[in-house]
Image (cartoon, coloured by chain):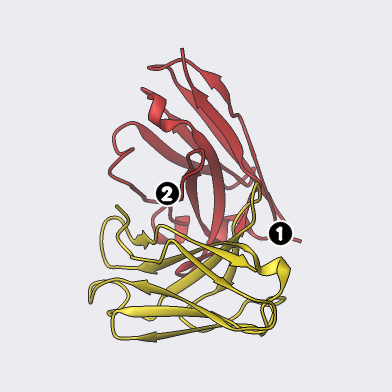
Amino acid sequence: QSALTQPASVSGSPGQSITISCTGTSSDVGGYNYVSWYQQHPGKAPKLMIYDVSNRPSGVSNRFSGSKSGNTASLTISGLQAEDEADYYCTSYRSSSTPWVFGGGTKLTVL
Amino acid sequence: EVQLVESGGGLVQPGRSLRLSCTASGFTFGDYAMSWFRQAPGKGLEWVGFIRSKAYGGTTEYAASVKGRFTISRDDSKSIAYLQMNSLKTEDTAVYYCTRVSVYSFDYWGQGTLVTVSS
């Protein structure tokens, strides 16, 4: 069982917006602004999409945005495109000998 | 351009050892912590461990599932991070990824190398 809770799957139609949640505790998501999100297409390496809750690395589309409220972080993808279909993972830093916790991943299907 | 290339994967029998390498280029390797992840077939990502930069002591941390069996090291002169895996179990079968640690996130990933533990 993953330390962070994500929905197993979400879906949306092209052009729509979807949000993926990532729920932790006050010791990780709620305690630090160090949540990051990763996109993984089948057979490919993960790619950083959002870091420090809401920052986008250079080259990542502004259709991707992140936010946090309390112990829950969220990834929102607007203007869904077929290429967005992938697995998405969240992670949060925590002050521990195992400094990061991960979510179990969410499969996004673009209908 | 930042590149991370893993190597050393393959088929190994249970109880044996294997060492993975992660060769980095395109950045000052010694300035960054490096981390290893794995992904079992059809499963999610699992963090394996990481090694801090020498500026932060070069110390390591590991996931409970591999602590005492796996060791991460680095050779800054060669820009290589290593993952030494001992006493391998069938449940260690996975694609292993190395990543660069950027403060609190993992900003670059290698393509992965497959480790299969089977008799």
Secondary structure beneath disc 1?
loop
Secondary structure beneath disc 2?
strand
Chain letter of the residue carrying label 1: B
Give x and y (percent) for residue B89.
37, 24
Dots 1, 2 in contact, CB < 8 A = no
Q: In which quarter of the image is the C terminus of chain A?
A: bottom right
Q: In the figure, A29 relative to A16: above or below?
A: above
| Closer to us: B41 or B98 | B41
Question: Is residue A46 toward the left or the right of residue B62 in the image?
Answer: right
Chain A on-screen colour: yellow
Give x and y (percent) for residue B103.
47, 70
Q: In the figure, A2 relative to A52: above or below?
A: above
Residue at 33% in and 47% down: B63
| Closer to us: A85 or B66 | A85
Task: Name the image quarter holding residue A25.
Answer: bottom left
| Closer to us: B52 or B97 | B97
Which residue was labeled with disc 2? B46
Chain assigned red: B
| Closer to us: B119 or A94 | B119
Residue at 61% in and 37% down: B113
Instruction: Name the outermost residue toward the top.
Output: B119
Kind of residue sitting beneath label 1: Val
Viewer can see residue A32 = no
Kind of residue sitting beneath label 2: Glu
Q: Nearer the viewer, mark 1 or mark 2?
A: 2
Measure how far apart labels 1 and 2 are at the Cα level: 23 Å
The first of marks 1 and 2 along the sequence is 1
Question: Is residue B64 toward the left or the right of residue B70 in the image?
Answer: left
Viewer can see residue A57 = yes
Residue at 64% in and 50% down: A42
Chain letter of the residue carrying label 2: B
Q: In the figure, B87 relative to A15: above or below?
A: above
